[in-house]
Image (cartoon, rainbow, N blue to C red):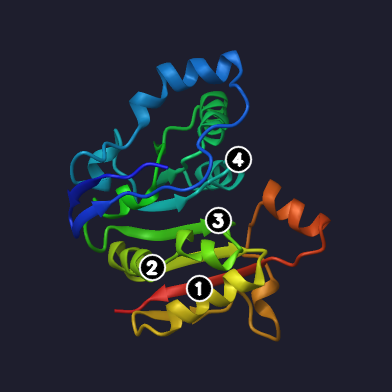
Amino acid sequence: MCADEVVGVSGPINRTLYGRRKGKKLRQLQAGLVTNELPDISVDCSKDIVPEQVFEKSYSEYRMEIGFGGAEHLVHESINHPDVGYIGCEPFINGVAKLLVQLNEKQLQNVRVHHGDAREVLLRLPEASLSRVDVLYPDPWPKWRQRKRRFLSENNIDEIARVLKPGSVFRFATDIDDYAGWVLARVLKSERWIWQEAKPGARAWQVSWENWPSTRYEAKAFREGRKPVYLSFIKSA
């Protein structure tokens, strides 16, 4: 866990990060990329973050993925949308290393990385600076006493709304029913959001988004008999 305070665009950044930050020992290639490549594509959270200035070239829009895990979705998106700049946040160094390997192999230039708490990035971003934010299979912290650790608190949901442009989308996927209900309750109490079902019809929230790549977490959910939920919320004007 890491905790300290920095002043960001929308006030003090109280950084509290729960859970593991490192797993198995990195392979030689991964360790080399973390040492030599990660600094060049890392987002500097010691100052305000302007997406247009984070990348070496300008992009048509900018998106953020919070907790990219094994990076399957982030890599898929960056390949299929080379005109979009992506900021990926992940506290688990092994996930960051896997992303770096993919970026290196596929020579992807439209991804920047924050190895740490995504809130550090959110609070440094200007208002209405992103076109989409994805939070996919975050740690559910299922026990009652752990729920305060969930990333999608009311404060963080408000920050996501602040950095999104009007009409842009916040996407959330989980295989834990309680977490889906938790997020719905907090999002729908605010007039800043409109819930958009992925496809019209009964139980449409169980239908994945168009051109959706499965992730390891989703595969595990299906193996264990859990049905993922896919929620999309439009930032109102």
Compared with 204, 155 (above or below) is above
Q: Residues within 10 Å of mark 2 (few under 14, many from 20)?
A: some
Say which residue appears at 67% left-offset and 64% top-offset: 175
Task: Kindly indicate whether the residue at mark 2 contacts the one at mark 1 (C-beta within 8 angstroms).
Answer: yes
Residue lying furthest front:
145
Q: Earlier in the sequence, mark 4 or mark 3?
A: 4
Query: What residue is shown with label 3?
Result: 138
> What's under tag 3, amino acid-wise?
Pro
Say which residue appears at 25% left-offset and 52% top-offset: 13
User: Residue 70 — which label?
Assistant: 4
Q: Earlier in the sequence, mark 4 or mark 1?
A: 4
Where is residue 16 drawn, in percent x and y?
Answer: 37, 50
Query: What residue is shown with label 2?
Result: 157
Gap between marks 4 and 3 measured at Cα: 12 Å
Q: Which quadrant holds the N terminus? A: top left
Q: Earlier in the sequence, mark 3 or mark 2?
A: 3
Q: Residues within 10 Å of mark 3 (few under 14, many from 20)?
A: many
